[in-house]
Amino acid sequence: MDMKSIIITGGAGFIGSHVVRLFVNKYPEYRIINVDKLTYAGNLANLKDVEEKPNYRFVKADICDFDTIYALMQEEHVTGIIHLAAESHVDRSIKDPFTFARTNVMGTLSLLQAAKLYWEAQPEKYEGKRFYHISTDEVYGALEMTHPEGIEPPFSTQASSEHHEAYGEDFFVETTKYNPHSPYSASKASSDHFVRAFHDTYGMPTIVTNCSNNYGPYQFPEKLIPLFINNIRHRKPLPVYGKGENVRDWLYVEDHARAIDLIFHQGTVAETYNIGGFNEWKNIDIIRVVINTVDRLLGREEGEDMNLITYVTDRAGHDMRYAIDSRKLQAELGWEPSLQFEEGIEKTVRWYLENQDWMDNITSGEYEKYYEDMYKGR
Ligand code: NAD
Ligand code: TYD
């Protein structure tokens, strides 16, 4: 299959930068074109180590700009698209749902239509082409805490598999009905439907994957883990929504990037794959681990910053629990997470503490002001 010219959208963001880095380094024979609008979440500092590579090109563009994307596809003879560009933060979507509909829905549609018109005009049509859409587990809605009393996360992979056997429909599987609750997840669900519709209607070779919460280096510090690492360092309050009992399923970002590589090359067209590490944690438990780790690495007494925990008004429509069953991907393509959570969180905290300049550049006055406005009244 000729897949030498690949557009990666959102490559200057958190997950996108890891995918770009992996592809640029692993496939020197490919041409990797990073298309990113550089919104507040896009940061070219995330890609400093690959920007000089001959197989890499950055194009500052909005995915909603059909003409620019179509012209770029013609110019670069694009054969593959890995689509990560999105508005990605639930709290922002609650404040400003229009931006989410614009980028996540209209932007995805614009990209699909550009790919359709360009690929259908080629003599070989869709042969050797791939449109790979990166989505989230949040489209499935929320799971209840269905484990019996006394059996509570965090769970090991082994325990999760056993729970799955014991309690049945306890995880999101690829056929779980979509039931999004936030404007963010509603916009992602809508974009997933458009991608599948382009396969069913026009025969475009599409793939969709739905992944659980990612963590690791280069994540924008509005998301739980980098925000809290930075706040602990500066001894600022840690705003825990509600009782801190919501459960998320955490995957190290490089394991997600490895899954994307595998699925892009070996996944079956029109299929959906769930990606997750069987690694559920209650927010409050993960926060305690992060506090202990930051304290230890900064030479403070472990746990001395627990008093920063500040319970605040819950997020509106806050989904109780996400938990991914990724056994299809494991069985069909042999993927599995490479890092245990303890290793991953240690690496992550260490990275943020060693890259304080990266963090300081982001936490500018303007960003702080936006953040303060967002949490006014909580
Ligand atoms: P992010 O917010 O860190 O990065 C998004 C990137 O998209 C930024 O570089 C931004 O500049 C770019 N972008 C935004 N609007 C654009 C537009 N109109 N045109 C071009 N570029 C635009 O997001 P992330 O956390 O890296 O997530 C990437 C993708 O993975 C998203 O589609 C998200 O829904 C999905 N996802 C994220 C997670 C997670 O835990 N972060 C989990 C599962 C799925
Ligand atoms: P987040 O990183 O925003 O990811 P998502 O909402 O996509 O899961 O939040 C992870 C969890 O942490 C979620 O249950 C909300 C909670 N949370 C807080 O309690 N306080 C915070 O300041 C943030 C950003 C999140």
Image (cartoon, rainbow, N blue to C red):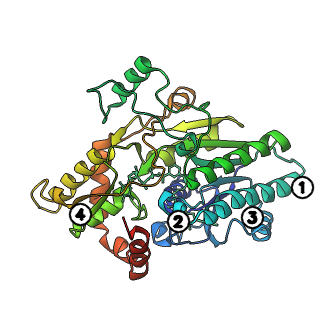
Marks 2 & 4, CB-CB < 8 Å contact: no
Q: CA distance from mark 3 to mark 2?
A: 37 Å
**Callout 1 environment at 10 Å: few (<14), some (14 to 19), or many (20+)?**
few
**Callout 3 environment at 10 Å: few (<14), some (14 to 19), or many (20+)?**
some
* Ligand 1 sits in quadrant: bottom right
**Which residue lies at the image location 68% right of the left edge and 54% below the top edge?**
81
Q: Nearer the viewer, residue 281 or 84?
A: 281
**Which residue lies at the image location 42% right of the left edge and 74% below the top edge?**
373
Q: In the figure, residue 151 lies in which quadrant?
A: top left
Q: Nearer the viewer, mark 3 or mark 4?
A: 4
Residue 76 is marked as: 3
**Amino acid bearing label 3:** Glu
Marks 3 & 1, CB-CB < 8 Å contact: no
Q: Which residue is mark 4?
A: 232
**Callout 4 environment at 10 Å: few (<14), some (14 to 19), or many (20+)?**
many
**Amino acid bearing label 4:** Ile
Using residue 279 as the reference point, say whether residue 306 is left or right of it.
Answer: left
